[in-house]
Amino acid sequence: MRGAVGVALAALAGGVALLPWALRAADAARLAAGAGFASVAIPTVAGAALLARTHGRAGHGFLVALGVAMAARLALAAGTLIATGIRLGSDAMGPAALGIAAGFVPAIAYEVAWFARARSEAPAAGTRA
């Protein structure tokens, strides 16, 4: 669960970094950026909880969870970009992409670091813990 909390904090940091721009942006751009951020930050945190739960267990659960979590993030990001373009016009797609990046990049960077650390701390195969 600690990994999911860290991912949530990393996504929140991305949102905070986006805030100074959003305060100066037009309403449509702010709405698009917020939709983009939420569309990846929420499933990223949910996916991180699932990944942390399945990490280190026997079987293919982790790989399935990883694939499902990544596919959900990509599908929601693409859907948000398309919906933003349709509802708010193509000018809002840039701010939506900015929001997607703000929600995705810090969280995925934290995930990669967390799993790399967890793997390096795990006992080697065939050894006793």
Image (spheres, rainbow, N blue to C red):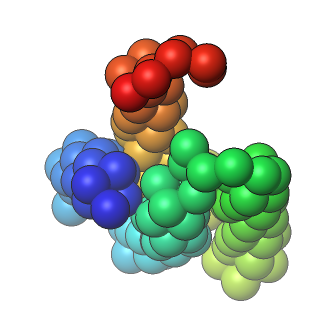
Q: Quadrant of the N terminus?
A: bottom left
**Quick check: 100 left or right of 110?**
right
At a point 78% along the width and 71% down the height, the residue shown is 79
User: Which image quadrant is residue 107 in?
Assistant: top left
Nearest to the observer: residue 8 or residue 17? 8
Q: How many marks?
A: 0
At a point 80% along the width and 52% down the height, the residue shown is 60
| Vertical order, 12 against 105 (above or below) | below
Whether residue 78 can be seen here: no
Could you say where residue 20 lies in the image, as x and y percent from the top left?
19, 49
Could you say where residue 94 lies in the image, as x and y percent from the top left?
61, 50
Whether residue 129 can be seen here: yes
| Vertical order, 10 against 128 (above or below) | below
Nearest to the observer: residue 3 or residue 94? 3
Residue ranking furthest to the front: 128
**Quick check: 74 left or right of 115?**
right
At a point 34% along the width and 50% down the height, the residue shown is 3
Nearest to the observer: residue 88 or residue 44? 44
At a point 38% along the width and 27% down the height, the residue shown is 129
**Quick check: 85 left or right of 36?**
right
**Quick check: 117 left or right of 15?**
right
Could you say where residue 48 lies in the image, as x and y percent from the top left?
49, 57
Could you say where residue 68 lies in the image, as x and y percent from the top left?
77, 62
